[in-house]
Image (cartoon, helix red, strand yellow):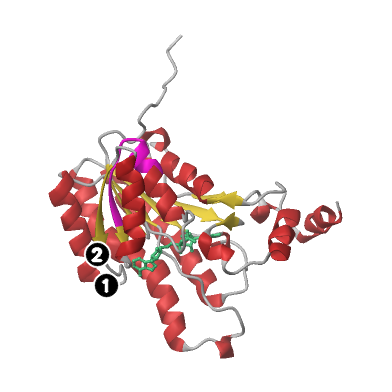
Amino acid sequence: MPSPKVFHERLSGKVAIVTGAGSLGHGFGTGKAIACLFAAEGASVCLVDQQHERAAETLTLITDAGGQAFISTGDVTDSAVCARIVDETVERYGGLDILVNNVGISGAPGRLEDIDEASWDRVIDVNLKSAFLMSRSAVPKIVARGGGAIVNISSVAGIRSHGSAAYGSSKAGMVAFTRELAVMYGRDFVRANAIAPGHIFTPMVESMLNEKARERRRKIAPLPLEGDAWDVAAAALFLASDESRFITGTCLPVDGGVTEIAALAAYDLVQQ
Ligand SMILES: NC(=O)c1ccc[n+]([C@@H]2O[C@H](COP(=O)([O-])OP(=O)(O)OC[C@H]3O[C@@H](n4cnc5c(N)ncnc54)[C@H](O)[C@@H]3O)[C@@H](O)[C@H]2O)c1
């Protein structure tokens, strides 16, 4: 019988860029958890954040645990910044294998007449255009290594209505962009997959949801839990590693099953 493939140090020898690798507050946002997990699995990681002190906290966690990382500060809606981040990474670590497009901001809820043009543009720029700009700079370097992986952080709001036109549109765009990348660069062995997190408790959510709202989301999901940044990081690790070498173009919900239920079933769950 052939021996099973067992993976240790799942990103050993790989070089990764993670955008939004800092976190609001002291807990773990998804970028911070992804960066820490990738480093723990042997990757050398470029930590990107527009706020240096946020990335510095992630860097300390990684280096204290014996991992490899450095910070590249900047706003990833700027194409020159994205090019510089990729160049710095390649210069430092000799190549690039993995890109995680994680930055994201929430969009104002409300009807269209309540959304001003500048805030619409900013949400689309941060949540979608940044992924295009980072990927455009990163893909040639990943191709030069013989292939690698791009992981795009979308949202359940990219799959189902969520109540924010700008946020939902940007996150649905991220799913479509991922598919395009997968088809465009598959022959170069560059895989692209998205993750759609939902009902994840992070520092960003902590400032937006009170305990009652958190209880409501635990009640409406098939799994009566909230996820955390590590649940998203575990999915990102799988999609970035060679374990998923035959998977590309997908969008993986990490959401306790909430996108799978129809309203009728949700009513029953709330009653229980
Ligand atoms: N938290 C959730 O429940 C949830 C659910 C669905 C999707 N998401 C998505 O997950 C991703 C991360 O969310 P989070 O709550 O962990 O984030 P977070 O807000 O804790 O961290 C994001 C980091 O990105 C940085 N950042 C923001 N804009 C930037 C820019 N233009 N350039 C460089 N850095 C920038 C911030 O400074 C911050 O440190 C986002 O794309 C978000 O939309 C989160």
Dot 1 and dot 2 residues touching (CB under 8 Å): yes
Which label number is shown at residue 78? 1
Q: Residue furthest top?
A: 1
Instruction: Name the residue: 68% across, 49% down.
Output: 225
User: Where residue 130 sits in the image (x, y, percent)?
Assistant: 34, 67
User: Where residue 178 sits in the image (x, y, percent)?
Assistant: 41, 56
In the image shown, does 130 or 26 lie closer to the viewer?
26
Q: Residue furthest right?
A: 271
Rendering quadrant holding ligand 1: bottom left
Label 2 crowd (10 A; few <14 / some 14-19 / many >=20): many
Residue 197 vertical placement versus 205 (above, below): above
Instruction: Name the residue: 24% across, 70% down.
Output: 79
Magenta-colored stretch includes residue 50: no
Residue 124 vertical placement versus 261 (above, below): below
The answer as to whether callout 1 falls within 8 Å of ligand 1 is: no
**Magenta span:** 37-47
Q: Secondary structure at mark 2?
A: helix
Q: Does residue 121 appear in this view?
A: yes
Instruction: Give the labeled residue for mark 2.
Output: 82
Label 1 to label 2: alpha-carbon separation: 6 Å
Q: Secondary structure at mark 1?
A: loop
Query: Along the horizontal axis of the image, is 107 left or right of 57?
Result: right
Q: Does residue 189 appear in this view?
A: no
Kind of residue at disc 1? Asp
Instruction: Name the residue: 59% across, 69% down.
Output: 208
Instruction: Name the residue: 33% across, 58% down.
Output: 55
Kind of residue at disc 2? Cys
User: Where residue 190 sits in the image (x, y, percent)?
Assistant: 31, 46
